Amino acid sequence: MPESRSSPTAELPVVRAIRGGLRLAAHPERAAAMQAYMKSAMPFRGVRAPEGARIYRAALAAHPVVSREEWEAVVRELYDHAAYREERYGALHLFHARPHTRWRDADALPLLEHLVSTGAWWDLVDHASTAVGEILLQDREAAIPVLERWAAGEDIWLARAAIIGQRKLRDRTDFELMVRLIAPSVGHREFFVGKGIGWALREYSKTDAQAVRDFVAATPQLTPLSRREALKWLERRQA
């Protein structure tokens, strides 16, 4: 694919380092299989995840991002102007990088919404959505109305992100909020929504098994997929 990028942010050192590193690490013989597996219209460089992570870390170490404005510009450049999917993975690495924790707050929700809605596939959405829980813990009042809008809207990827966003919070999970975010999609037949509901419930079942059992029992509208996924860990534990 031609790599014509004329935006000013394309010349930022960290962007150039990531794109250059991916170009040097490319494995064309793997790229087609990776693209086919992901069912992606965007081609791959053929760079596997561990190798990509090393490239992203090295680029950021050599060229630290020093402001919120630069952080958002770099993330958007790599994400919106990607010629290869690994560039989008690099954008998400920079979005989630520990040095940028201070910028992943309620003011980052529009950027997160953009990443989810334009990513529109499970690999990108699931990675991006881990910031939901982080932002919730920092600023519930600002985050909850946004997540409720995502959950009630027509964009299945925003709904999935809202539903699964607390999956890593364990005992800090707001289960009542999770139930509210699930409610608009509880009988949804779309695979990625139904599976997301089950995944969120399954992860919380590792913290409060009875709460999940009670919710599943009291919610006959759950699809078989959501129900099966929700109870999977509990049933394996009992086997």
Image (spheres, helix red, strand yellow):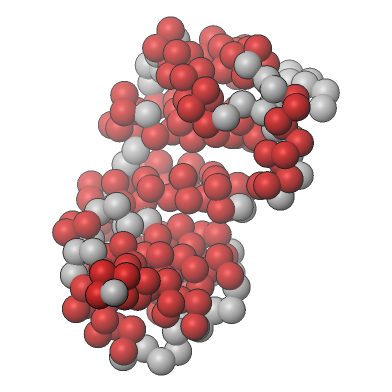
Residue 56 vs residue 71, the one in the foreground: 56
Residue extending furthest toward the front: 239
**33 left or right, relative to 177:** right
From this view, report whether residue 105 is shown above or below residue 234: above
Residue 99 visible in the current orientation? yes
Query: Quick check: 33 left or right of 142?
Result: right
Measured from the top left, where is residue 5 in percent x and y?
73, 20
**Residue 176, percent from left and from top:** 25, 73
- Residue 148: where, in percent of width, then height? 40, 67
Q: Residue at x 63, y 16 (%)?
A: 25
**Quadrant into which the C terminus falls:** bottom left
Q: Quadrant of residue 190?
A: bottom right
Which one is nearer the viewer's eye here, 16 or 39?
Answer: 39
Residue that lies at the very extreme toward the right in this rendered image: 2
Q: Residue at x 51, y 59 (%)?
A: 158
For image coordinates 83% across by 23% down, the residue present is: 2
* Quarter of the rendering containing residue 147: bottom left
The image shows residue 111 at horizontal and vertical percentages of 48, 42
Whether residue 180 is visible? no
Q: Which one is in front, 101 or 7? A: 101
Q: Residue at the location (49% across, 68% down)?
A: 195
Q: Nearer the viewer, residue 204 or 7?
A: 204
- Quarter holding the N terminus is top right
Relative to 34, is 39 above or below? below
Quarter residue 215 falls in:
bottom left
Left/right placement of residue 82 relative to residue 198 reads right
Label count reads 0
Vertically, is 221 above or below 212?
Answer: below
Q: Is residue 236 left or right of residue 171?
A: right
